[in-house]
Image (cartoon, rainbow, N blue to C red):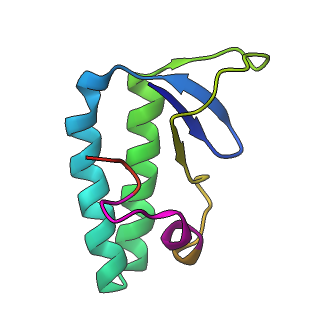
Amino acid sequence: MIVRIMGEGQVELADSHFAELNKLDDQLMAEMENGDGPGFRRTLHSLLDTVRSLGTPLPDDALAPSELILPAPDATLEEVRDMLRDDGLIPG
């Protein structure tokens, strides 16, 4: 799956990593619902760091469509809330 981190670029990520990412996504959702700003920021960075470490960066000139778009590391709680689906940032 091709994942875009806003403001950074794209990485290719194996579907086998999505169980781990969904745990972080669930934690991020809970922190957002509870208004836990510091927890939200910590978990967002952990989610993005995990995507970066598990994924393979695509060249900047790659034109592959992103199947998943994640917020930038400095995104606000409100900006992330606007990106959410019923099941969080990550489907499943």
Quadrant in which the N terminus appears: top left
Residue at 53% x, 48% y: name it.
70
**Magenta part of the protein: which range?**
79-88
**Residue 43's quadrant in the figure?**
bottom left
Q: Is residue 48 magenta?
A: no
Q: Residue 18 at what x, y percent from top left?
A: 27, 34
| Residue furthest out toward the right | 61
**Residue 79's quadrant in the figure?**
bottom right
Residue at 63% x, 28% y: name it.
65
Q: Is residue 84 magenta?
A: yes
Q: Residue 34 at what x, y percent from top left?
A: 29, 84
Left or right of residue 50, residue 67 in this image: right
Camera-side residue: 42 or 90?
Answer: 90
Left or right of residue 15, residue 89 in this image: right
Q: Residue 67 at what x, y percent from top left?
A: 51, 34
Q: Residue 55 at what x, y percent from top left?
A: 44, 22
Residue at 73% x, 20% y: name it.
63
Q: Is residue 66 above or below residue 37?
A: above
